[in-house]
Amino acid sequence: MSDTSRKETMQFETEIQQLLDLIIHSLYSHKEIFLRELISNASDALDKLKFKSQTDQSLLGDDAELKIRIEADKEARTLSVIDNGIGMTREELIENLGTIAKSGTKAFVEALKEKKENALELIGQFGVGFYSSFMVAERVVLVTRAAGSDKAYRWESQGDGSYSIEECDEKCRGTRVTLYLRQPGEDDQDYTQEWVIRNIVRKYSDFVTYPIVMEIEREETPTDDEGKPIEGAEPVKKISDETLNSMKPIWNKRKSEVSEEEYKEFYKHISHDWNDPLETIHINAEGILEYNVLMYIPGQAPFDLFMPENKSGMQLYVRNVFIMDNCEDLLPAYLRFIKGVVDSADISLNVSREMLQHDRIVGKIRKNLVKKVFETLTRMLKDEREKYLKFWDNFGQVLKEGLHTDFENREAIADLILCASTHSEDLTTLQEYVDRMPLEQKEIYYIAGEDREVLAASPHLEVFRDKGWEVLLFTDPVDEWVLQGLFEYKGKKLKSVAKGEVDILPEEEKKEKEEKLKQQEEEFSGLLDFIKGVLGDKVAEVKLSQRLTSSPVCLVADENAMSASMERILKAANQPVPPSKRILEINSEHELLERMRELHRAQGESDELKEFAELLYDQAVLTEGSKVASPEQFCSRLTKLMLKVAGAGGQEG
């Protein structure tokens, strides 16, 4: 076991070093942001202490006035941000500042490599704003003492690949971050100047709910006992604390009192995202239930949106007192991308996460928040289509999860769904699809897979193309799972064109088609039995198709069976796939099948015809987007066929 009292030098993770290099060399036009990030971190530390002190008052000791202090030393060229918050242990220091303590490290590195030109956006996405200090500092020293601990630690780094940690003396709880500033360049601000610090705090952190104080030096003329200036007296220098921020929680203000810039800066404060939000939702509810809400739809999806550890972005306050982060009871999981704050005077200050699940007031607030989010998205879809398309591109897959998990709001979610379709290149809503349906069309038709172009060219769509009927194309990985929860829309059932029977003909045409198929089944019965015999357990059945009009063959799942697309998704995720066999449908009017029928009559069960049957099956597998079982055998059969057609048959050996 190492002696934690001695100075120990450690290496940053490779990813952290890449991040530091990127920050130092790429973000020169955004340097002042570092102070916002340090103040936000200090505010978070105070929030955590305030929450823990609800159940353990001893953590506050004799230092119960929570605040953030800024100290600037012009001669030493240092700037310090100090808080008396929760502090950090040695282990927390290493975890928080030496590594990226997330399973998304690999994704982060890949993103760095791909998008170096947009480093600011990435750093916000990955929530590592502390390192922005190295934009302006040649050295950073952090001294911290965890609440309830008698040990303090000093962390130091020059951003050169390593950092050191050692035990130190520190009487006060909390964290002090000291930046040893570089000399300012020609276009740089001097961050030791009072007016520079004051302007940055007012711009980015005015709404922070704790006082941000700084010692300010003023010259004052001495006054007499009556408070009147003494004539001829020399001005006296006085130093006193001044609070730089208003501290009025922005969510408690009326919409008319908040500027667009203030909304944006508060979003960046709570989300640690350096990009502007896409949409702001501000609610001041009064009446039987009173609460204030400020919610944001981000402009970009975070890298960990689909990772298991991704949590709700909602914070809960009770009468301006921070209660908890990541409050999952305020919004359902499929709205986890929403960031924001809920403050209510009607919830108990002593509420716990377990109690929230059964709290009637929280349930009502949650219901109203979901309703407001849907109203906002509906308005965007109707009036700001381009903005909604941006939202959908980032968060559509997550919103769709609600179709499977939220029965109560299923219809509202379905109204917001966008899909690709055979109608045009533009995405469409389900309502727009229904509005375009011919009178005789009774169901909503769709096909699911990985690629829009592959789906649009699928043989399963041929009879629909010929008839001029639109088919929806679902291409997101979650779609197959989600569609299990969406059985119908506006009274019209959703029907996969790759499953079960296709029944789209009027009664008279249907009767004619059935009679024709009966006749063809007699003619093709021998070939159908032969193909089934060759393919064996690969298929459940071989039969004539009603959906094919130009392709020779396709594979169709049973009405209640798992689709080929779902099988591929499960296999890719290393999930067990229950055994299933699809139906091979052949087009009796295709020239190839006519020729095969003639060959079967003339030659019977020849080896050549067996090869054709295998090729037919592999062709059907490929057109549905799956992989053939043996690419080598497929290529070998194809080569033999090509040689024969080219007149080279029998010349080998």
Image (cartoon, helix red, strand yellow):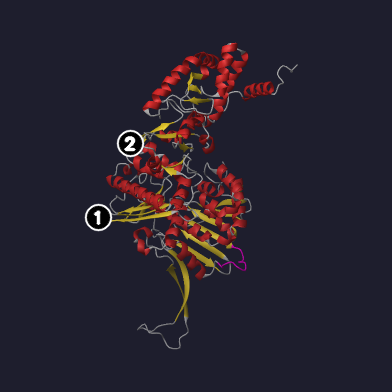
CA distance for labels 1 and 2 = 37 Å
From the viewer's perspective, tell me whether residue 630 is left or right of residue 333: right
Q: Is 30 part of what is drawn in magenta? A: no
Residue drawn at the location 36% of the way across and 83% of the way down? 225
Per the image, the residue denoted by label 2 is 491
Is residue 315 at all visible to an observer of this figure? no
Determine the residue located farthest toward the right in the rendered image: 653
Q: Secondary structure at mark 2?
A: loop
Could you tell me what secondary structure mostly forms the magenta stretch?
Answer: loop
**What amino acid type should be assigned to the residue bearing mark 2?**
Gly
Is residue 614 at all visible to an observer of this figure? yes
Q: Which mark is residue 18?
A: none
| Quarter occupied by residue 66 | bottom left
Q: Secondary structure at mark 1?
A: loop
Is residue 36 placed above or below 301 in the rendered structure? below
Q: Position of residue 568 (x, y in %)?
A: 51, 30
Tell me how many marks there are: 2
- Near mark 2 (Cα within 10 A), the count class, few <14, some 14-19 or many ≥20, is few
Q: Is 189 part of what is drawn in magenta? A: yes
| Quarter occupied by residue 615 | top right
Foreground residue, 164 or 493?
A: 493
Foreground residue, 221 or 647?
A: 647
Dots 1, 2 in contact, CB < 8 A:
no
Q: Position of residue 495 (x, y in %)?
A: 41, 32
**What amino acid type should be assigned to the residue bearing mark 1?**
Gly
Quadrant of the snapshot with the C terminus: top right
Quadrant of the snapshot with the N terminus: top right
Give the residues drawn in magenta, as a range: 181-190
Per the image, the residue denoted by label 1 is 287
Q: Position of residue 440 (x, y in %)?
A: 37, 34
